[in-house]
Amino acid sequence: MAVVCTSIRQALDGIHNGASVMAGGFGLVGIPEKLIQGLRESGVRDLTVISNNCGVDDWGLGILLQNRQIRKMVSSYVGENKEFERQYLAGELEVELVPQGTLAERIRAGGAGIPAFYTPAGVGTMIAEGRETRVFGSKEYLLEHGLTADFSIIKAWKGDRFGNLVYRKTARNFNPMMASAGRVTIAEVEELVEPGELDPDQIHTPSIYVQRIITCSGYEKRIERRTVRK
């Protein structure tokens, strides 16, 4: 059974300087915003963060960048964050850019205990320079390694006290695979229910992957980029 935490500080206990952290979400959708705010308040430093992107300048993981708490980012997209760009170009932030599908598969593989796999993505590009490739069926493939992390912080719509989770629509994104790839997985949920209240056929992340769970409220649900007619 997952530990039901009563505070963000309790949920984040043990995340130390230099830890690796997977953070769910895509853009600002499905991000564990309360846990991210808790990391900022904790002051933990030199984090390696694995996430599709790094939020925006003043929200999501972007607030950890502003506070200089991230040493390295492993991600696939950085286009909405000017501070990310500035720190990278100034040599203040280490960045490992990974094709988005490859990033998803590296996390899934890590959670499944698969150490490495071959993919055609990146072959013939700068990503493949100096790295192992093999030919299968007359096509060249690039070796990629599975990803795991010391901690995964994820966001779900509903969870029960065992740690079973249900995500809402596109907020599912990277969250389920990151839940399986963290040595300690911490889930923030909008609603916590009793065991048996969730339809077993609708559970996206089984409780075996979740070590801590906390109920949060007051979500802002910001829009990453708003485009309107003139």
Image: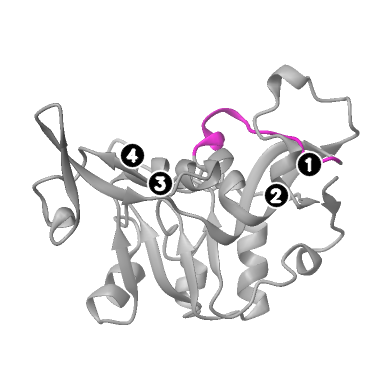
* In the depicted structure, whether residue 36 falls above or below residue 14: above
**Front one among 130 and 155:** 130
- Amino acid carrying label 2: it is Ala
Q: Which residue is mark 2?
A: 187
Q: CA distance from mark 2 to mark 4?
A: 23 Å
Do the residues under discs 1 and 2 have CB atoms within 8 angstroms? Answer: yes
Q: CA distance from mark 3 to mark 2?
A: 21 Å
* In the depicted structure, whether residue 227 falls above or below residue 67: above
Mark sitting on residue 28: none
Do the residues under discs 3 and 4 have CB atoms within 8 angstroms? Answer: no
- Amino acid carrying label 1: it is Gly
| 5 with respect to 8 (left or right) | right
Q: Which residue is mark 4?
A: 101
Ranked by sequence position, the earlier of labels 3 and 4 is: 4
Q: Which residue is mark 3?
A: 106
Magenta residues span: 162-173
* In the depicted structure, whether residue 40 falls above or below residue 77: below
Ranked by sequence position, the earlier of labels 1 and 4 is: 4
**Front one among 55 and 180:** 180
